[in-house]
Each structure stands twice: as C-alpha cells, then as structure tokens.
Amino acid sequence: MVPRTLPLPWLDRAGRLSPLKLAVFLAILAPGIYLAGAYSADRLGAKPITALLHGTGEWTIRFLLASLAVTPLRRVANWPKLILVRRMLGLGALAYAAIHLALYIVDQNFVLTKVVSEIVLRFYLTIGFVALLGLLALGLTSTDEAVRRMGPRWRLLHRLVYTITALGMLHYFLQSKIDVSDPVFWTGLFLLLMGWRILQRFGVPSRPLPLLALALGTALATALLEAAWYGLASGVPASLVLSANLDFSGVVRPAWWVLGVGLLLPLASLLRPMPVRSPPRAVPAA
C-alpha cells in the first residue's frame, strides 16, 4: 500500500496553486521567521526567551481570531473562497501555541516536574494549558476524514473554538500584568466576531446599518471592559479610564481601534459584489 502524501498547503482541492492559500501560508510563517531571526541577531532584549514566549502567544491569539473572522468576512464581503484558509489559520494557531509551550519548557530549564507543578498551581497557566489541549483536539480532528467519520459530532466539537479563544484571552490578560491595552484590543475584536454570530443567530441580516450598530456597540463594550479590568485589577477609577478614551493627546485607546476595525464590516457590506444571477430560461412557445 502506497502511503498518501500530505497535500501541499498552497494548493486547492483540485491540486492547483491557490494565490490566497499561498499568501496566508506565507503570512503564518512570517512571524516565526521574524522571531527566529531576531533571536539569532540578539535583538530580543535581556530576556530573549521571554520575548519569544510573548511573541508566540500573541500570534496564537491573532491566528485564532483570524480563523474566526473567516466566516463573517466571506459572508459580509461575499468572498466564498476565503473558506479555503480557515483550517490553515487554525492549524497555524495550534503551531504557535505548541511552540509557546515548548519555549516555556525551555524557560524552565527543561525541568518537567517544575513545568507541571507551575501549570497546576498557577491559574493563568492552567487555563492556557487547557486552551492548548482544546486546540490540539481541534487540530487532530481538522482533516476531511475526521469530518466524515465524526458526522454531526464534528461540528459540536469544533464549536469549542469559541471557549478556547475566550480562555486564551483570559490567559493573555492575566499574564499581561500592568498594561492590558493589547489584550483589550484583541478581546474587543473577539467580541465583534461573536457579536456578528449572535446577530446571525437571531436572523439579523449583514447589512450596513446592523453592522454599524455592531461596531459601535462593540467599541463601547471594549471601553467598558478596559475600565472594569483596571478597576478590578489595580483599583483605578472606571471614570478615569473611560475619560482617557476621549483624550486624543496621548495613546489612542483600544476601543477606538476596535471601532475602526468594526467599521470595515459595514464598508465591506456596501462594497461587496452582488452575486451574478443566471438569466431566466426561455420558455418554449406552445
């Protein structure tokens, strides 16, 4: 029996080169190549392993969110071919998460007993490890064969991606300590993507006005999330954090960046190409 070779990631199902898949594949490789190059060139500061840990963790979150963005974008922008890269993005997130764990083991000097005890005793490490196990389960069942074999259970299992992403976000927040601007921004995007799914669940069409309301609501939720986190974690008054969103003399707060990304959805809805309809068939005369 001749073993089947793995399909090249830049080919479509017909075996032809897919520019979209090739571009996404290279985009997934790029951060890893950059981080490896920066490490080799000694450009990651006094704690290079820590910098690599943070970098791989952040890219895990980014690729997870990118995979969750595929369905909204393909429907809002009428871009059906985007579905071709969803699996690749999810596997990319899994790869960076696995490297993230491997780097943590390196950071602990390969003392596996310490690694295990830290994961068990530190809550933020526990939820991060649970998220990694969930990603691994999704990755192992991402093949076409697994879809056929599992049937309806496959869809049920892969809905865990929402819980996994939420756990990853919480892990990101807890390890960020003082400045949580980046976790707030990425969590805001997660809320945007989940908000779109909720609208779909209730039958709200992906038209400009509902999408505009979604963008505004998500930006407000992001601002409230940031204020709540700082209030609970460090005792900073929520009013002070919220007022910072109206001060443009300094750093632009995450809520505004989330709003900017969210506004791309109604814009895409306005600009999306309309599906081409086939002309009606001529009815032969009686």
Image (cartoon, rainbow, N blue to C red):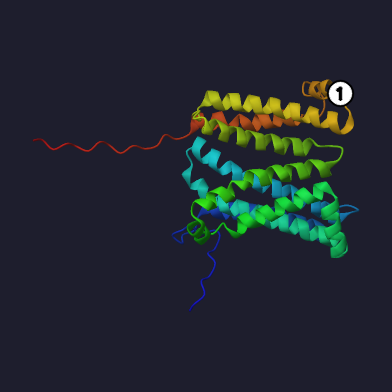
Question: 190 above or below 129?
Answer: above
Most extreme residue toward the right, as rendered? 46
Q: Say which residue appears at 53% left-offset and 70% top-offset.
A: 5
Q: Is residue 77 visible?
A: no
Q: Which residue is mark 1?
A: 237
The image shows residue 123 at horizontal and vertical percentages of: 82, 47
Q: Say which residue appears at 19% left-offset and 37% top-offset.
A: 282
Question: 101 above or below 127?
Answer: below
Q: Say which residue appears at 80% left-offset and 53% top-offset.
A: 53
Q: The residue under label 1 is which amino acid type? A: Pro
Most extreme residue toward the bottom, as rendered? 1
Q: Say which residue appears at 53% left-offset and 52% top-offset.
A: 153
The image shows residue 116 at horizontal and vertical percentages of: 83, 59
| Viewer-proximal residue among 29 and 215 | 215
Residue 139 occupies quadrant: bottom right
Q: Is residue 72 left or right of residue 62?
A: left
Using a 10 Å C-alpha cutoff, classify the residue at mark 1 as few (fewer than 14 neighbours), some (14 to 19) or many (20 or more).
Answer: few
| Viewer-proximal residue among 134 and 81 | 134
The image shows residue 127 at horizontal and vertical percentages of: 76, 48
Q: Secondary structure at mark 1?
A: loop
